[in-house]
Image (cartoon, rainbow, N blue to C red):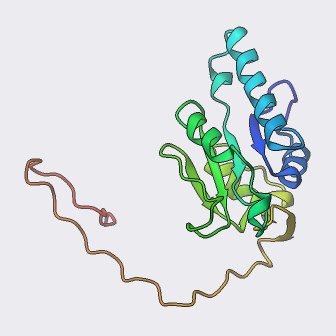
Amino acid sequence: MDPFHAPTLGLVELPALSDTLRQLGFRVITDADFASAAAAIHGEIVRARDSGDLNGTRIPIVVSSFRSLDPKDRVVGLKAWVQRNAPISPVLVLRAEDPASPSYIDAQEARYLQLPTTVGHVLEAIGFPVPHDPRAELIVNIDGTIGGSALDFTPPTPAAPAPAAAPAVAPWPSLPGAATWPPTPAE
C-alpha cells in the first residue's frame, strides 16, 4: 500500500497488533499508553477536520478492553472514552473478558469482536481490505499478543451445548408481504 494513501486507523492498548498492521501497510495512529494514544487519535481527527478531510474525521478505532486479570491494571477512563467516541468514529472493541469484569466495555454504537481472532477478522470488522498476506492469518490472542496462525488454531470446545436456533419470525402484521426473518435461501 502507498503510505500516502494507506488506510488509517486508531489503535488503543494493542502494541503487537500495531506492529503487524504497519507491516501490512496500514497507517496506525497510537501511542504507548491509553492517554497518549487517545491524544494522538484526537490530534489526527482534529488535523483531518482542519484540513477539510471529512472522511479522516471518522477513522476507525480499535480498542482492547483486556489489560490483565488483575483489576488494578484496568485502564481508567477507557470505557468512558469509548462511549464518547463510538457515536463519532467507528469503534471496534476487542473483548476477552467476562461481562461481569470491571473492564468490560459496552458502548451503544460500538462494534465488538471476541478474542482470540485473526488480524484479518479485525480488518474485516472495521471495513478495511484484508491483504493476501500470511500475517493476516495471525492470531490476536486474549492478552493482545500476536502469534500462531489461524490455520493452526482450534477454537475452544464449548462447555455447554449451543442453544437451539431461534424459529423464523413471521412478518409484521402491519407490513403486508414483508419477508420472514431469517430469510430462506433462494432456490
* Quadrant including the N terminus: top right
Foreground of the two, 135 or 19: 19
Location of residue 10 by image quarter: top right
Location of residue 128 by image quarter: top right
| Rendered location of residue 187, percent (x, y) | 31, 67
Location of residue 182 by image quarter: bottom left
Would you place residue 185 above or below residue 151 in this image?
above
Q: Residue at x 77, y 71 (%)?
A: 150
Residue 22 visible: yes
Residue 25 left/right relative to 51: right
| Rendered location of residue 26, percent (x, y) | 82, 39
| Rendered location of residue 184, percent (x, y) | 30, 66
Would you place residue 80 above or below residue 170 in this image?
above
Residue 94 left/right relative to 165: right
Foreground of the two, 14 or 23: 14
Foreground of the two, 74 or 39: 74
Foreground of the two, 84 or 16: 84
| Rendered location of residue 47, percent (x, y) | 76, 16
Residue 28 visible: no
Residue 169 left/right relative to 121: left
Residue, far front: 72
Q: Residue at x 72, y 47 (%)?
A: 76
Residue, far top: 51
Q: Residue at x 84, y 35 (%)?
A: 36
Number of labels in the image equals: 0
Q: Residue at x 83, y 71 (%)?
A: 149
Would you place residue 178 above or below residue 66 in this image?
above
Would you place residue 36 above or below residue 42 in this image?
below
